[in-house]
Amino acid sequence: MKRIASLLAATTMLVTPAMAELLDLEKDELTFGFIKLTDMAPLAVAYEQGFFDDEGLFVTLEAQANWKVLLDGVIDGQLDGAHMLAGQPLAATIGFGTKAHIVTPFSMDLNGNGITVSNQIWEQMKPNVPLDAEGKPIHPISAAALAPVVESYKTEGKPFNMGMVFPVSTHNYELRYWLAAGGLEPGYYSPENITGQIGADVLLSVTPPPQMPATMEAGTIYGYSVGEPWNQQAVAKGIGVPVITDYELWKNNPEKVFGITDEFARENPNTTLAVVKALIRAAMWLDENDNANRMAAVEMLSQPEYVGADADVIAASMTGTFEYEKGDVREVPDFNVFFRYNATYPFYSDAVWYLTQMRRWGQIAEAKPNTWYDEVARSVYKPEIYLQAARLLVEEGLANEADFPWDSDGYKAPTPAADIIDGIAYDGKAPNAYLESLPIGLKGNQKVIGTEIQG
């Protein structure tokens, strides 16, 4: 695969305006970790297409068993960097879980997740789901359709269990967001109780992404929130139905990041720039010419050393479509976005959203002023490194000036209410006002004491 890609890259170079100019690297042999999900694609592409090589970097990519092992590997130096959950650098930096200062100079992608329920739960939900003229479910599907099902399980004294991949994962926050938007309590955390199940209607627990379909098939969980290809895998196996994608939940929402320690970034500034340059080129390649390279990326990711799922399963979501029920294939061209819409720029407002969700559900136990959210975002997200790398690519003729937000203050324009499932707008510059606007979740000075919300 690498040899073939190198030949293709060599051919491409014939029409490339300029070769990458090598920086004076502090460290050129690097090991990066990832989890077997399609959104690790920028790492695989940078390796296979020779973009790391162009920067003088000798990179090894290593799949990790789970997100905790991955984070620990970056912190203790076994890994130089990794494909990370966006919540991981933030949580580590503020000391929720493992304490360490992790930074991100590169956002991996937008969208890419879904929420899937078992066939049994879907059949129970369907009477509550409106249909179009052809008899197909109208999307997006609200968790309000799940609420009567959860209530019936409660009446029978049965817990309603769902899976997510990690306590500070986008998947946890997206599943919670969807449930709360439908009137269901997804539960709270407290310093004494980190299960996240305090007062919950739906009990959420951690399951590693590749194990999601099998865990649901075994009946341990009734549904889950995960990245691809593990929603489409449930459809392919005939065991579940994705009820909503995160694109429908929040249009063009931020997803994974590339994480390194603050120490690594400070001690290896040129190496960090070189890595970001290679990753930007990979993201550009993934989205260029209206996703013309996506099937090549699918074949790449299907290899066992990367995602290792069937190419057809990966392609089901990565090439502009998404399959819900068997045969219900719909156009979702922006389900996976790697470069469009400034996807790779590490916006402070993205960081702030994750922090608001940590506060909303009690992972941040006490109220914080708006200035705190901004300060934490700036300590973790590093757009200045990103733009420096982008400038070098532009100067080398490898990227277009117009493709980068040079004048950004680090905050996106507020997300309009129409782009979010609950119809509540999000403004990263006003985190506390945003928290107040959400009907379910901690507000103001509220705290979780024992099993109650007080304040």
Image (spheres, grey):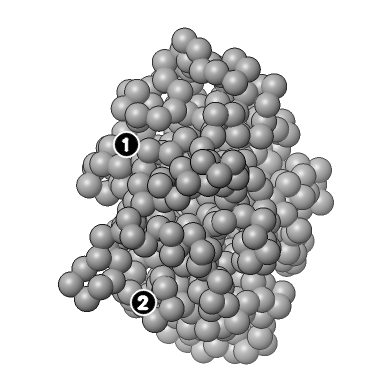
Residue located 48% across and 83% down the image: 295
Task: Report the residue marked by disc 1.
Answer: 426
Mark identifier at residue 316:
none
Foreground of the two, 147 or 366: 147
Q: Regarding mark 1 in the picture, which secondary structure is present there?
A: loop
Task: Report the residue marked by disc 2.
Answer: 328
Foreground of the two, 119 or 383: 119
Q: Amino acid at mark 1?
A: Tyr
CA neighbours of label 2 inside 10 A, class few (<14), some (14 to 19), many (20+): few
Q: Regarding mark 2 in the picture, which secondary structure is present there?
A: loop
Does 391 appear above or below 297?
above
Q: Amino acid at mark 2?
A: Asp
Residue 223: which quarter of the image? bottom right
Residue located 68% across and 26% down the image: 193
Residue 403: which quarter of the image? bottom left
State the image coordinates of residue 150 (x, y, percent, origin top left): 48, 46
Does 98 appear above or below 390?
above
Closer mark to the observer between disc 2 and disc 1: 2
On the question of residue 242 being in view, the answer is no
Residue located 63% across and 66% down the image: 217
On the question of residue 454 being in view, the answer is yes
State the image coordinates of residue 254 (x, y, percent, origin top left): 44, 50
Foreground of the two, 123 or 371: 123
Q: As drawn, is 256 to the left or to the right of 328?
A: right
Q: Which callout, 2 or 1, points at the residue further toward the start of the chain?
A: 2
- The quadrant in which the N terminus is found is bottom right
